[in-house]
Amino acid sequence: MEPNNLCTVERRGRVHLITLTGAGEHRLSPALLSAIRSAVAASAGAGALVLSAEGKFFSNGFDQAWARTAPLHLHSTMDGGFRALVADLLELPMPTVAAVTGHAAAAGCALALAHDSVVMRGSRGFLFMSEVHAGIKIVDFLAELMREKVPDAVNRRDLLLRGDKMSAAEAVRRGIVDKAVDGGVEDVVNAAVAEAEKLAARGWDGEVVAEIRKAVWPKVWDKAKDYGADAPAAARPRL
Amino acid sequence: MCTLEQHGNVFVLTLTGDDEHPLGLPLIASLSSAVASAKAAAASAGPGAALVTVAEGRFFSNGLDIGWAGTSRTRLMELADALRPLAADLLALPMPTVAAVTGHASAGGFLLALCHDYRVMRADRGVLYMSEIDIGLPLPSYFVSMFRAKVTAANALRDVLLRGTKLRAAEAKEMGIVDAVCPGPTETVAKAIKLAEQLAARKWDGDVYASIRISIFPEACKSVGIVEESDEEKVKNFASRM
């Protein structure tokens, strides 16, 4: 993977650890999405993947500031880039774990939930579908991802329609994330890596992991599949 | 049959009278008109409104007016067809909605309560009950869509639709069907209004709120005839606000 100042990759045992770098909001601009996709592609040969972040934020969602200045015809590069990243994660031939080290809002929250497992910092940070407060409608792909990953009607309403800021404890209680971890960013990352290592140790056939995962989340896969790295070029939308 | 009052930024829709508030054509028309009035009033007032539906007497509603329908399947279908657009209006309403389940809510009455975003229910009396299985009536498909969308706890859908379980407020809360339980009807109405005030105070954009509601329950909304906006239409709204 080419070095960039947006994310780093490292191997810890069998775990491919991606870290969104810097103290900023890790807004999912086309550039960051592209960097993360490269980092995901570099996971070949690993047994599991972890996505984490430095600083106060996991990700605060799409880059609205970029969208404000970019020409309208380029906006699809952000939506398309996000779909492509989700497609890559859905067809990744290894288990995936999100280390929600800080606030995960809007598309940032959806990105975390797009992983197989979610480990979240207990003392700080919220899951926050902020769209209702910001006056932004939720586009179909984002909604589909959230619907598949949050099947409970009350959870869906509270997270998306009421825009609750959900702490890790609350999210665990509701079954939206898997584990809350006390301590700082490093503690959360270590816990996520440990979880990923445990999953890697199962020795699952990666292709089978990918096939079963896509079958478990068929609706979001169906809406993402034409965007991913393995999509036939003819099917892939021109971004 | 029903009244609409405004208390600050909360619209209170009351099913009046001491009867079972059967959903016949006149009551459905009356409710539809009231919901439309609330929508129009909110449109001119700007963001920050909410609707509470309450009922007088021992019943919230016992559903479609099977007294009027009698043995006529045609009449029953006419009632189901008339209720469907009211359900759509509630699901597309550009403001948060709360049902104060102040009495029995069965069949179409239970559906009516489910069409709201939140439910507050009295603990002392009254049940939520889908009676169709006991009476031997099939369920309109949009009824099933609504229940499938909103009743997602394990076995809850089976218990409610297929077993005709009568739910008191506490059990309904366990199942995630009711959000708050209050001792009696006065507290239930007060709590529902208070919840509505809190929701209204968020000053959410009504059009966005309704859109998000539709995007979290798309199949149920489709089943009552709501056509969801395309992404282009959704984004156009955002782009013009930037």
Image: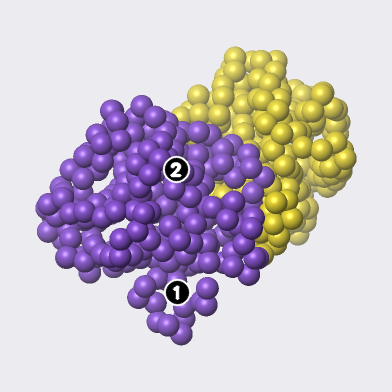
Chain colours: A purple, B yellow
Q: Position of residue B111 (x, y in %)?
A: 64, 43
Q: Which disc, if any, is residue B208? A: none
Q: Provide the secondary structure element on which disc 2 rests.
A: loop
Q: Residue at x 71, y 60 (%)?
A: B236
Q: Which disc, if any, is residue A24? A: 2
Residue B43 seen in the current view: yes
Observer-side mark, 2 or 1, equals 2
Q: Residue at x 52, y 73 (%)?
A: A239
Residue B192, above or below B41: above
Answer with the quarter of the image where residue A9 lies: bottom left
Relative side of B217 to B51, left or right: left
Q: Residue at x 44, y 43 (%)?
A: A24
Q: Quadrant of the N terminus of chain A?
A: bottom left
Residue bearing the label numbered 1: A226
The residue type indicated by label 2 comes to Gly
Residue furthest to the bottom: A234
Disc tally is 2
Closest to the observer, A11 or A141: A11
Residue B84 seen in the current view: no
Relative side of A137 to A142, left or right: right
Chain for disc number 1:
A
Q: Position of residue A169 (x, y in %)?
A: 37, 29
Q: Position of residue A127 (x, y in %)?
A: 45, 39
Residue B107, above or below A107: above
Q: Residue at x 64, y 58 (%)?
A: A69
Answer with the quarter of the image where residue A168 lies: top left
Relative side of B174 to B183, left or right: left
Q: Provide the secondary structure element on which disc 1 rests.
A: loop
Closest to the observer, B242 or A167: B242
